[in-house]
Image (tube, grey):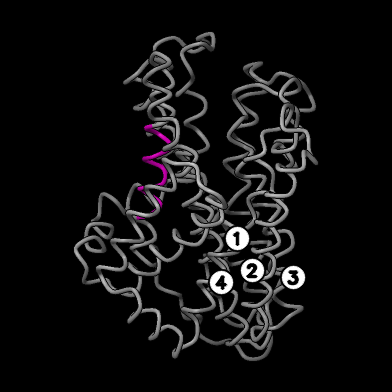
Amino acid sequence: MMDGATAERPRRARIPTLDGWRAVSISFVLLSHSASGFDTSVYEALRLFGANGVLVFFAISGLLITKLLLEEADANGRIALRAFYVRRCFRILPVVLLYLAFLTISGLTRTPGELAASLFFYRNYLPFNLAGIYTFHFWSLAVEEQFYAFWPGLMRLTGNRFVWPTALTLSLGTAAWRWAAVALHLIDTKSVPPGSRTDFTLDSMLMGALTACILHRTESRLWLRRALHPAVWLCLAAATVALCVFTVPFGDFLKATTIPLLLAGTILNPDWPVSRLLEREPMCLLGRISYSVYIWQQMFLLPAWIPNRLGPLQLFPFSLLACLACASASYHWLEKPLIAIGRRLSDRYTKVSIHA
């Protein structure tokens, strides 16, 4: 039961534009991973789509989670951490456990350490020689879960007033550390990919969090809406594409800055043609199952140089169809019912239920 008298729980409306952005993100991942099933030249031409698609996912996570927690703190006077983690567990874990169970039964994991690192979300720091291809994508889940492990508590500790300077300071610190660690050879970049390290990628989510703080306040929200004139937004979009293609100093931090602004532009201007496109039902449908698609695609969309273990299911286009079928079934029959249970359980710890 909730504290005090039972009241109606206002549900936060979904933001269709963000579902559309999720669809864009997972489409980039699918394009990149599908290309890996062909010759090396095709893969090299398209592989950057996957990495940058994940960066969009990170920006969405930082923005949306921070937005919801700011609203919860305003409504309740505090952030209910237990409620947050109950919702996250019921959202994240079911499909992860199912996927890892399938890998284990099929003998597709390489070492016990790989399974443990995937299950406890430190796969992004596991050396290459201890892990296989079927859990490689768990690096990004590890980054997000490690972000969730500290950010809500830090928001509760600092209070809404100081969330934005905290996010900005940590973002700048991440960018500075990333530059120093690579330039001064402070880390081993051979056994663990630098791009998968949480301490190298936090700014992608923290700048999303900073954008959520701007959107949360009426004055700054109106200022940002005026600043993101369509011409400015298009310039930001072009700059983001250029940053994805070319290597420039502090390019990762610049992408971490521009991507959340692109998201904010479409949130603030739902009448824009690009916003209406993102809110089309096919885009939203793909966006809603994007997490499931991301988990299952690694089973089917394998590089051409990896031995085929599932026959035609790992050959394009059957691989893509199998991925979408598994993801859809997983979302509707497993994840969606358990998400609803998680929300009901989380209501024990908060007066107002605000769902991600």
The magenta-colored residue range is 21-31
Helix, strand or loop at mark 3: helix
* N-terminal-most mark, 2 or 3: 3
Instruction: State which quarter of the image contains the N terminus.
Output: bottom right
Q: Mark 3 sits on what residue?
A: 153
Helix, strand or loop at mark 4: helix
- Viewer-proximal residue, 179 or 322? 179
Residue 263, position in %: x, y? 40, 63
**Which residue does the image show at 40% across and 69% down from the upper left?**
264
Count the marks.
Answer: 4
Which one is closest to the eye, mark 1 or mark 3?
A: 3
Asked if residue 34 lies left or right of residue 152, the reply is: left
Q: Mark 4 sits on what residue?
A: 210
Label 1, residues with CA under 10 Å away: few <14, some 14-19, many ≥20: many
**Gap between marks 4 and 3, in whole Å?**
16 Å
**Which residue does the image show at 44% across and 28% down from the upper left?**
33
**Gap between marks 2 and 3, in whole Å?**
16 Å
User: Which secondary structure dominates the residues rendered in magenta?
Assistant: helix
The answer to whether residue 40 is above or below residue 76 is above
**Gap between marks 1 and 2, in whole Å?**
6 Å
Helix, strand or loop at mark 2: helix
* N-terminal-most mark, 1 or 4: 4
User: Identity of the amino acid at label 3?
Assistant: Gly
* N-terminal-most mark, 4 or 2: 4
User: Identity of the amino acid at label 4?
Assistant: Leu
User: Identity of the amino acid at label 2?
Assistant: Ser
